[in-house]
Image (cartoon, rainbow, N blue to C red):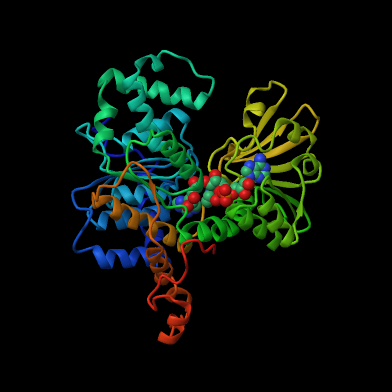
């Protein structure tokens, strides 16, 4: 396998990918600025970067930037449905990275791709990881764990996906029982894209099991208060409409979770004229939803009311078997959270009385024992990337500018500990500044008197560490 240059769906799509990458340049000002600033000095020269992040046109521009800064790249997607095959082909064709990703991977193929992204032709591993959801970081950590305790390979696991991971690790253990231990030693750190991946990192930091330093890119203000919020505001409706062509106006939409993603999702469907109900566990977010005029209900109440259901919690089994059995005939059910367990898909997939009728790729009608059916999008995986193309380039430019800044910090080898770090506010403000011109924003400059009055530096940072945007 390791001699494999790349594995993508169709290299004939490369030209289309190049055209869409070129068209996105105007929309990724932050990335273009980083290439201008560092393209000559190449601060990532000689460093190997493994990526596990949706292989889209936007990610192709992130890869282009990391490549321009000197990195040697291998890439997989972090979701079986989110690859845009023309983006993958263009990246391979332009020799920006070796790519192992295609839309519609099986779970076994997904974990093979992830391992291929983490392993160079000579069997060596990366210096740095760009992760989204933490699956690449998980494979390295579980690899080290089984090499410490091979008996873990003998067990059988109820969780189907975890069993696939352990089967894959059994193969690498057979080839080299020190493979992952050697790889982990060399890794300078990981930069993590999303809320759920960041939660995993803080759990490992708390348990003391983190094997290398990590940057929490999600909690850059110019990531989560933009991508999670405004990105979902645009790409959620895109996913639902491309999948079902449903009229949203006048329908009852139920958004589970009112965090950054839930806020953008609720606003998205309200914008199309839906009557939006919200469910929440957190009194503060529930109060925010109420202040915005949303009706805050429980899923038990909402199950029989909704026409369209969207989970956005980062939690699991938020929409359960009981909820599905109460739903209207042909209610649409989807998830925009990172993992596919927000909807209890295991009930549908393991109950003989539940019959799946495939309408088209990533759109299934499930006949239920209730005598009614529901429409499940992208098999419960994130609907904006499974049924559409994810967030547009402009908002991803801010997220990915933070990713590159985090990679540059990790590359410096400045004795970071095995813990989770956040980029400084000054850089966050810089990322925002890089995106103003494209929108014609005219920023006001503080006078010295005003700066003194506010007790801030005229060049920033403009807010305290505890400021909530
Ligand atoms: N599809 C996409 O493009 C994106 C997906 N994400 C993912 O979306 C998920 C949510 O992300 P954020 O909004 O940033 O997280 P968040 O933590 O800001 O919001 C999640 C909210 O869900 C609530 N919640 C948890 N369990 C719940 C339950 N059982 N019922 C109702 N509410 C519940 C929490 O109280 C919280 O307010 C994560 O998995 C994240 O990785 C994030 C950004 C973009
Ligand atoms: N078009 C896109 N390309 C790459 N990543 C994306 C895109 N849209 C959303 N995402 C990311 O997907 C993760 C969730 O897996 C986020 O937190 C977003 O930053």
Could you tell me which residue is drawn at 72 percent across and 22 percent down? 353
Relative to the observer, which residue lies in front, 354 or 448? 448
* Residue 326 percent location from the top left of the image: 80, 35
- Give the quarter of the image for residue 214: top left
In the depicted structure, whether residue 175 falls above or below residue 44: above
- Give the quarter of the image for residue 329: top right
Q: Is residue 95 visible?
A: no
Q: Quadrant of the N terminus?
A: top left
* Residue 255 percent location from the top left of the image: 68, 49
* Residue 87 percent location from the top left of the image: 39, 51
Could you tell me which residue is drawn at 66 percent across and 38 percent down? 318
Q: Is residue 413 visible?
A: yes
Could you tell me which residue is drawn at 26 percent across and 67 percent down? 37
Q: Quadrant of the C terminus?
A: bottom right
- Left or right of residue 144, residue 230 in this image: right
* Residue 366 percent location from the top left of the image: 70, 33
- Give the quarter of the image for residue 235: bottom right
Count of all numbered marks drawn on residues in the image = 0
In the depicted structure, whether residue 185 falls above or below residue 92: above
In the depicted structure, whether residue 286 falls above or below residue 156: below
- Left or right of residue 355, residue 417 in this image: left
Relative to the observer, which residue lies in front, 275 or 452? 452
In the depicted structure, whether residue 135 falls above or below residue 158: below
């Amino acid at each position: 396998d390791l001699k494999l240059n790349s594995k993508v769906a169709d290299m004939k799509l490369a030209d289309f990918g190049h055209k869409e990458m070129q068209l996105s340049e105007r929309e990724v000002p932050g990335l273009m600025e980083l290439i201008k600033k560092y393209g000559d000095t190449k601060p990532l020269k000689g460093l190997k970067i493994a990526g596990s992040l949706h292989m889209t046109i936007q990610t192709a521009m992130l890869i282009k930037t990391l490549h321009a800064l000197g990195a040697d790249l291998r890439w997989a997607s972090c979701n079986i449905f989110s690859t845009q095959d023309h983006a993958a082909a263009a990246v391979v064709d332009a020799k920006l990275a070796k790519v192992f990703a295609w839309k519609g991977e099986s779970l076994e193929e997904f974990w093979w791709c992830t391992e291929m992204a983490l392993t160079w032709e000579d069997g060596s591993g990366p210096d740095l990881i760009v992760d989204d959801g933490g699956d690449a970081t998980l494979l390295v950590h579980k690899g080290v764990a089984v090499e410490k305790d091979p008996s873990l390979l003998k067990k059988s696991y109820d969780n189907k996906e975890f069993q696939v991971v352990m089967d894959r690790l059994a193969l690498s253990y057979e080839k080299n029982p020190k493979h992952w231990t050697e790889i982990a030693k060399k890794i300078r750190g990981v930069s993590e894209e999303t809320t759920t991946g960041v939660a995993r990192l803080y759990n490992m930091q708390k348990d003391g099991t983190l094997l290398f330093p990590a940057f929490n890119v999600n909690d850059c203000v110019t990531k989560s208060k933009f991508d999670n919020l405004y990105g979902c505001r645009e790409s959620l409706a895109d996913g639902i409409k491309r999948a079902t062509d449903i009229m949203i106006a006048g329908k009852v939409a139920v958004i589970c979770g009112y965090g950054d993603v839930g806020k953008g999702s609720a606003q998205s469907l309200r914008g199309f004229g839906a009557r939006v109900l919200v469910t929440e566990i957190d009194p503060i977010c529930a109060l925010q939803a109420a202040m915005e005029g949303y009706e805050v209900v429980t899923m038990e109440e909402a199950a029989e009311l909704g026409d369209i259901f969207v989970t956005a919690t980062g939690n699991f089994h938020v929409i359960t078997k009981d909820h599905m059995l109460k739903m209207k005939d042909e209610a649409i059910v989807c998830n925009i959270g990172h993992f596919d367990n927000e909807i209890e898909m295991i009930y549908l997939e393991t109950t003989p009385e539940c019959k799946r009728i495939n309408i088209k790729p990533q759109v299934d009608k499930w006949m239920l024992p209730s005598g009614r059916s529901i429409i499940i999008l992208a098999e419960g995986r994130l609907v904006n990337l499974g049924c559409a193309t994810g967030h547009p380039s402009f908002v991803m430019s801010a997220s990915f500018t933070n990713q590159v800044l985090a990679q540059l910090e990790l590359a410096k080898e400045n004795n970071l500990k095995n813990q989770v770090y956040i980029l400084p506010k000054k850089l966050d403000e810089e990322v925002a500044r890089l995106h103003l011109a494209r929108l014609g924003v005219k920023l006001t400059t503080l006078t010295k008197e005003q700066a003194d009055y506010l007790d801030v530096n005229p060049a920033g940072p403009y807010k305290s560490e505890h400021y909530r945007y």
